[in-house]
Image (cartoon, helix red, strand yellow):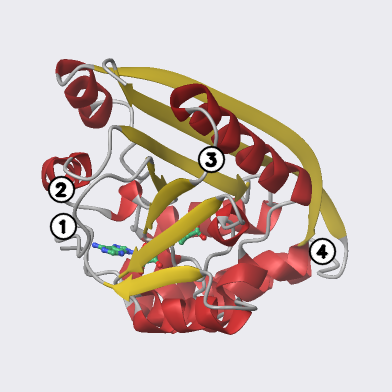
Amino acid sequence: MTHINFDRVAMVYDQTREVPKEIINLLIEKINKVLFETFGSPPYQILSLGIGSGRVEKYLSSKDNHLFGIDISELMLRELKKKQKTESIATAQADVYNLPFRGNFHLIVAIHLVHLLDNLERFLNETLKASKLIIIGDVYTDVYQSLIYSDFIEILSKIGWEKQDSAPVDGFITREMSRLGFLREDIERTETTSQTHYSIYDSIKKKYFSWLWDVPDAIYNEALSQLETRIQKKNINLNESYQTTASIELKIFKKRDI
Ligand SMILES: C[S@@+](CC[C@H](N)C(=O)[O-])C[C@H]1O[C@@H](n2cnc3c(N)ncnc32)[C@H](O)[C@@H]1O
């Protein structure tokens, strides 16, 4: 089971991980298209794993789409509940390794989740009991194009702490799904967008990036102090924006017999 607890960022999750509306629209359009092509007309039952605060998943709920969501973080789910006009999304606090739902969902989606899991085999076993159509994906704004972010990673590395890149879904999941008779289709799109330097600085300073939770305090404090010195030396105006990109990446796995 994952030990990463998103309770600590629940209240700021959406505002620190914003993606442009065009990317969200594309996500909804692609998901509805694959549902229609696979099953014909709605309604559809969709299960979101690691739904969190529903940052993007909330848009999947409609009169045609009955959305269910599970998450291990109580406070992320509480944020989702605050947003709902009605009780239109059924949620449960649960672990993806032990789904509280059985049976046939038309679709299971896992957005920005699998990089956090330490047992992908167990995750797949559990997921595949509940659907033959699985979308694993991500919707994000690229922070690596921020000078402040890349400087911080470089400083950490010089102090002796290397940021590990998350395990990609390519690899184990793709091999396993292919062995089990799933076809894979990829959808990717990138749009230009902008962010302020401040949003990145603030997310580092308040440890809103989940990977920062692994950095030992002494190293983190030293790196932050060096980062602040660099910001001053380079005369970076934190209120200015820099150009970056927002992307959607979806891997659609569909069992051959549906
Ligand atoms: C990076 S957030 C993504 C949230 C949402 N899908 C989004 O894209 O905005 C990952 C979410 O997965 C949840 N999570 C992590 N491990 C989990 C597990 N083993 N079972 C259920 N939820 C889990 C976290 O609590 C968190 O809300």
Spatial CA distance of label 2 from label 1 is 6 Å
Name the secondary structure under disc 3: loop
Q: Is residue 88 visible?
A: yes
Q: Residue at x 57, y 58 (%)?
A: 61
Q: Is mark 1 within 8 Å of ligand 1?
A: yes
Q: Residue at x 46, y 84 (%)?
A: 78
Q: Earlier in the sequence, mark 2 or mark 1?
A: 1
Q: Is residue 225 visible?
A: no
Q: Which residue is mark 1?
A: 97
Residue 236 image label = 4
Vertical position of residue 83 compared to residue 199: above or below:
below
Label 3 vs label 2, nearer the camera:
3
Q: Amino acid at mark 2?
A: Glu
Label 4 vs label 2, nearer the camera:
2
Spatial CA distance of label 4 from label 3 is 51 Å
Spatial CA distance of label 3 from label 2 is 25 Å
Q: Earlier in the sequence, mark 3 or mark 1?
A: 3
Give the image quarter of residue 58: bottom right
Name the secondary structure under disc 2: helix
Spatial CA distance of label 4 from label 2 is 48 Å
Give coordinates of residue 6: x percent, y percent: 39, 74
Spatial CA distance of label 1 from label 4 is 45 Å
Q: Are marks 3 and 2 in contact (CB under 8 Å)?
A: no
Label 4 vs label 3, nearer the camera:
3
Q: Is mark 4 within 8 Å of ligand 1?
A: no
Residue 126 image label = 2
